[in-house]
Image (tube, coloured by chain):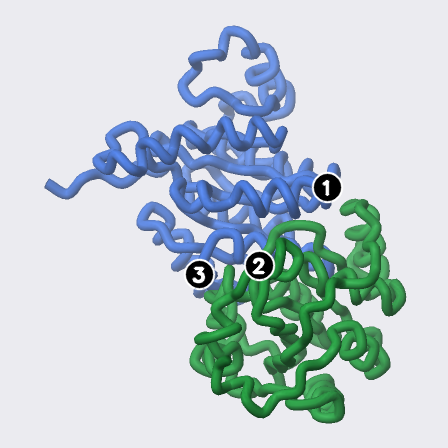
Chain colours: A blue, B green
Amino acid sequence: MTLGTPRHGSLAGKISCVIVAFPAANAPQNTGPRMSQTTAAPADKPWHEIVLAILKANDVKLIVYVPDRVLTKLIAALHVDSFFTVFAATREEEAVGVVSGAYMAGLRGAVLMQTSGFATLPNALASLVAPSQIPALLFVSERGTLGEFNLGQALVAKTMRPVLDALAIENHTITRHDELAFIVDRSIKQAYATQAPVVFILSPLLTGGKVFAA
Amino acid sequence: MSSAFHNLNVMSRLDLTRRLVALLKRDEAVIGGIGNANFDLWETGQRPQNFYMLGSMGLTIPIALGVAIAQPKRHVVALEGDGSLLMQLGCLTTVAMQAPKNLTIVVWDNGIYQITGSQPTASQSTADIVAIARGAGIANSAWAAEEGEFEKLMAGALDGGGPSLIAARIDGEPGVGKTERDPVAIRASFMRGIGGKK
């Protein structure tokens, strides 16, 4: 996949051969529930169950998060699964520090956050994760688009992909349920194989997002 | 001057770092915080179990917490400055909540941002690092009044029963060592040193 994968196909024409050809050559051809290579995570499960199964299949045991409404079910499921060590950090960069230390000591970890939390991270990414080549896995619940009601969130969201692209950090915006398992599973494997961080931006198209309670 | 300081000797960070390293007998991991904390750690000799931070100010303790969680049988020491800690005070509450027995936090408190021109930090006048740590939930937090007490507190902390925090008032001298500016080499060396590379 490419850096800065476009969200809604705005650039798809330029790179569609990369995006389409890669999974199609390896994935089952609509013959039933789509499975990731190693995880047995059927696509008819809710998105958060698929993410949990893929984390487990890739031996990602440490989960540090700063809470988000969209991630509530995922966080709750992680907390009750004894496979995982799960806790909240007070800031996103603190969480990145914890999973970086854990990785160096042999334990795989991921950070969960929302878009505004990502905006606190550029220093930790640019001065620890990227130069040290630490395969931090970051899951970002995407706010600020597709029905956002908070102008602050909408503006913060616009800083996310430019920051990631400026740092040449692999990032995928996941909009489609049927692509979730493949993208997350393959990208986690790539992160560890290449000692590189990866960011999964979970679109409201995937999660439903957070909508204004009228 | 804060009341917390009234009975404390002003010590040398390099001297205390040497004393600390001399107490390490079980391949303990040491995370040297950004700037002077890791410069003086470097000067004491490059143990394979040392990690030297070249950036990410404030993340010494979170990194140490991650190592401690990943390797509960290995003791982990975080060397942090007062300015860096004040940037990321919330991490003390996380440490207290997770309560790793194998984590010791050492705070070198000179009351200044030494490396940027010795501007005053809040700990020079009003903030008490040990009181903050206790308030965050790290009950085993103490000031070391002089070198002998520092060694005694450190030896006790290394025997387990953490998390603990030891704060020492130090002078305004800059760090002595010149840490190698190669983050990948530092990370790889540390991983080999603590068996983190699978």
Q: Quadrant of residue B19?
A: bottom right
Q: Nearer the viewer, residue A65 or B164?
A: B164
Callout 2 and callout 1 share a chain: no
Q: Is residue B144 visible?
A: yes
Callout 3 and callout 1 share a chain: yes
Q: Amino acid at mark 3?
A: Thr
Q: Amino acid at mark 1?
A: Gln
* Residue at (48, 86) in percent of width and height: B3
Residue that label 3 marks: A90
Mark sitting on residue B58:
2
Quarter of the image where the C terminus of chain B is located: bottom right
Q: Secondary structure at mark 3?
A: loop
Location of residue B118 in the rendering, given as x and y in whole percent from the top left corner: 61, 61
User: How many C-alpha atoms fall within 10 Å of the one at disc 3: few (<14), some, or many (≥20)?
Assistant: some
Callout 3 and callout 2 share a chain: no
Q: Are marks 3 and 1 in contact (CB under 8 Å)?
A: no
Q: Secondary structure at mark 1?
A: loop
* Residue at (72, 62) in percent of width and height: B36
Residue that label 1 marks: A195
Q: Amino acid at mark 2?
A: Gly
Instruction: Specify whether A30 is left or right of A60.
Output: left
Q: Nearer the viewer, residue A202 or A116?
A: A116
